[in-house]
Structures are given as C-alpha cells and as structure tokens.
Image (cartoon, grey):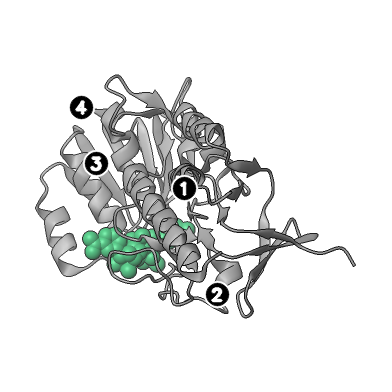
Amino acid sequence: MEENEKIRCLIIGSGPAGYTAAIYASRANLDPVLYEGMEPGGQLTTTTEVENFPGYPTGVTGPQLMEDMKSQAQRFGADVRYGVATAADLQNYPYKITIDSERVVEAYTLIIATGATAKYLGLPDEQKYAGMGVSACATCDGFFYRKKRVAVVGGGDTACEEALYLAGLCEKVYLIVRKPFLRASKIMQDRVVAASNVEILFEHTPIGLFGEKGVEGVHLIKRAGEADEEEVDIAVHGFFLAIGHKPNSDIFKNYLKLDAIGYIQTEPDSPRTNIPGVFAAGDVADNTYKQAITAAGSGCKAAIEAERYLSEKGL
Ligand code: NDP
C-alpha cells in the first residue's frame, strides 16, 4: 500500500490566519503545506474594499489582499494546494487529515484556520445583490453607507452591536427582528433602544430586496401567519445580516473542545488547543473580534507554536 504523505506543518484554510501561518512557517523552514478549502481566500474574498488592514493607506480589495498574502507565503516556499479537508483523525500521532474525501495526509503539526461562515436567510435576492448592498459585516462595509439608511437583520448581540456601529455612521438604522423581543443581552438591548436613529421593527421578516443598480429597499412581512399580517416596504441602501456565524469546525468536533456554538476553544491568548501540536487560528476560534488583522495575528502565533512544538520533539 502506498504510504500517506507526511507533512511537518499542515495548515487548513486560506484566509488571513492560514496565509499568515504559512508565511511564518515557511520562513521558519517548517515546509508548510496549506490546503485552501472550499472558499480560497476566505470570507474577505466576498467583500469589496478593505480599508482597515494596516499597510494599505488607500485601501485594497479583499481578493487582492488575499492574493498578496498567498504570493507572500509562496515566495518563501509554502506549498499552497487546492483541496478541502473532509475528515480528521486526531486520535493517533501523526494526525491524519482526509483531503477531498479521497486522500489521507499525516501531519506532525496542524494549524486549523478554517474560518467561520456568516449565515444568510437564504433569499435569492441576497445573491442577486451580493456586493451591491448586501453584507454580513458592518465593520467591513458600514463605511460605504455613511449618512444613508440601512437595515440590520437579527435580534442577538451581534445584530445589536452591528446596529450600534452603523448608527454612528448612518442616517438611520432599522433593526429587523423576527420575534416580538430581542435575544441580546440586556445591556445591548438598552443601548439599541437608547440610540435615537435606530428603529426596531419587531415581528418583521424580510422576504425580498428591491432596487435598480443595488439595494434600494426591503420587502417585509409584519406578523407573518397572523390575522393582521401585512406587507411593509422600507427604503434602505444597505442590508446587513447578523443572524449568526457558523464556525467551520465540524470535522474536529470529536477531538477538540468546542464552545456551545462550535468555536474551537484555545488556551487563553494562545492558539493551543486541547491536543498537543494542534493549533486553531482566526475566526474558527474567535467569536469576539473576527477581524482580518486579528486572524492574521493568531495565524502568526500558531506558526510560532508549531515551530516550538516541532523543535521540542526534534522533528
Ligand atoms: P445569536 O444566535 O445569539 O442570535 C441570532 C439572532 O438572529 C437571533 O435573534 C435570531 O432570532 C436571529 N435569526 C436567526 N436566524 C434567523 C432567520 N432565519 N431570520 C431572522 N432572524 C434570524 O447570534 P449572535 O451572532 O448574535 O451571537 C452569537 C453568540 O455570540 C451569542 O452567544 C452572543 O451573546 C455572543 N456575542 C456576544 C457579544 C458581546 O458580548 N459583545 C457580541 C456578539 C456576539 P431568534 O432570537 O428569533 O432565534
């Protein structure tokens, strides 16, 4: 039988965390192999302009930023490959990862940088207006809606946080909540209620978007399924989803400590997981900051940890 390929530093995921880990690991001669995953470049490839990544004073597009990180990693010899990690066996060392359900590679250190995926409602219009008014990240895209009207969907802490962030930039923010109450913590609810330019639309469900060249408004149903159900339209230029993220940690759930939502739990201020030699970086382990720059920082830490682990083991 053909032997599995053995990899000293295997990185899964190609967002800022994965590529930064690859830059550091390749410069440390760890011969990293990086599998790009389902969405090469990660979540940033779905945004347009990135204006808050240090080093780009006039901004950079998300896809360009990721292309730059990739070529920087390749310049030092990182082996970047197409392929999706579809299964994991972290029981025995070296750890085994199945790629594309067909091939197994073995890793002496593993950096999980598989990210998180923003949840969408599933409306066809969300795709139709992708990059034209629909966003799942207020910190990334809110700036483009300065002094305009926007809507945020969701009733949790993220939705409240996004609504408050946008309230500081926009003329008016509608918070669209499907239930008659917010699920968010009391303090966040109080802040949203106190914000003079945030209007909460309880018991409203978005059913579609409209607009000629981009989003100009949302079709909503008020009190869907009730006797007094009615259709309501609101005029907005931005439509922000804040109905939760799903960390891409499924294949590791039998081995790694996850929180209730599925985020990989790491040691405080470290990418170390509960399994030696396995590190988690970026959004798959971060339910708090979720920024490209914080992901990149944790990818750097993961590569440094991998280097220490390998050298302690003499590998
Ligand atoms: P949550 O799961 O807490 O909330 C999701 C919200 O989206 C809920 O109001 C939910 O409605 C709504 N929703 C879900 N699906 C749909 C849908 N199809 N249509 C309409 N509405 C929908 O996710 P969050 O991202 O807000 O928070 C995740 C976790 O992170 C929470 O534990 C939160 O407390 C924490 N967090 C903490 C923060 C902080 O402390 N500063 C900041 C951000 C997050 P419904 O209530 O009806 O189910």
Residue sitting at x 33%, y 57%? 177
Q: Residue at x 30, y 19 (%)?
A: 58
- Mark 1 and mark 2: Cα distance apart in space: 30 Å
- Towards the viewer: 212 or 130: 130
Check contact, mark 4 vs mark 3: CB within 8 A: no
Of discs 4 and 2, which sits in the foreground? 2
* Circle 4/circle 2 CB separation < 8 Å: no
Label 4 SS: loop
Taking the image in four quarters, ligand 1 sits in the one at bottom left
Q: Position of residue 199 (x, y in %)?
A: 21, 47
Location of mark 1 (residue): 28
User: Measured from the top left, where is residue 209 in percent x and y?
Assistant: 47, 36
Q: Amino acid at mark 1?
A: Ala
What number is the disc on residue 147?
A: 4
Q: Residues within 10 Å of mark 2 (few under 14, many from 20)?
A: few
Q: Residue 46: percent from the left, percent from the top?
A: 49, 36
> Which of the labelled discs sits on residue 173, or is there none?
3
Q: Nearer the viewer, residue 128 or 141?
A: 141
At mark 2, the secondary structure is loop
Instruction: Tell whether 71 sits left or right of 80.
Output: left
